[in-house]
Amino acid sequence: MTQRQKKEISGIVIGLVVLVIIFGVSNAFIFTSMQSQILGLNTKYNTLNTTYQNYKNTHGYSDSQYFTLNTQYNTLNAPRLSSLSLSFESIDPSFGDSYLHVFGEVWNVGNSTAYNSKIHVTIYQGNVIAADTDILLGMITSENKSSLDQQVSYSGSTLTSYNYSLTWTP
């Protein structure tokens, strides 16, 4: 090898060594920078997680508390029918069938609509059921009423008692 070739090879080697050193230093810088970013993100994550856990501990509800609150909410938000202004009168005419006159108003005092509303009426003659029927009221929206004037007919002796119940679907 000639002196000139040795100088060229040594220049190439020196150039490669410089490049390796530059790449090594830049990789070390990038690695250090990435480690610093990872450390900063881990610190932020831990801070946020601690804040979240503290919030959850002071503002969270247990399952039983949730179900109790949900039941109370559904109860308050449900339709509720009231029969305060509903009247019943036994009518025994001289001719024709006797009947129970059902009249007045059924109010929905709840916070949502009552669908398929009805009054279930049972009329008794002693221990015998003389009539067992439903008076259909339909849909009653919240804070509204359904007026009625119905006759529930029965035959035989005078009624001794009756009972009724209000039913609906939410």
Image (spheres, grey):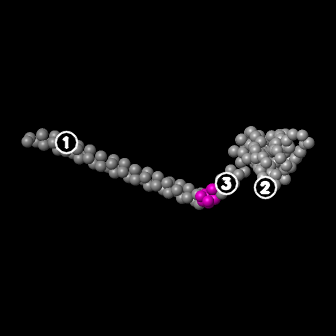
The residue at the point 74 percent across, 39 percent down is: 139
Circle 3: residue type: Thr
Answer with mark 3 or mark 2, whichever residue precedes in sequence: 3
In the orientation shown, which residue stands out farthest toward the left? 1
* Alpha-carbon span between mark 3 and mark 1: 83 Å
Q: Which residue is mark 2?
A: 127
Residue 50 visible in this rendered orientation of the protein = yes
The residue at the point 76 percent across, 44 percent down is: 133
Circle 1: residue type: Ile
Q: Which mark is residue 71?
A: 3
| Chain part drawn in magenta | 58-67
Q: Is residue 17 rendered to the left or right of residue 53? A: left
Answer with mark 1 or mark 2, whichever residue precedes in sequence: 1
Residue 142 visible in this rendered orientation of the protein = no
The residue at the point 46 percent across, 55 percent down is: 42
Q: Is residue 79 rendered to the left or right of residue 95? A: left
Q: Count every numbered label the image shows and give the total.
A: 3
Q: Which mark is residue 12?
A: 1
Q: Secondary structure at mark 1?
A: helix
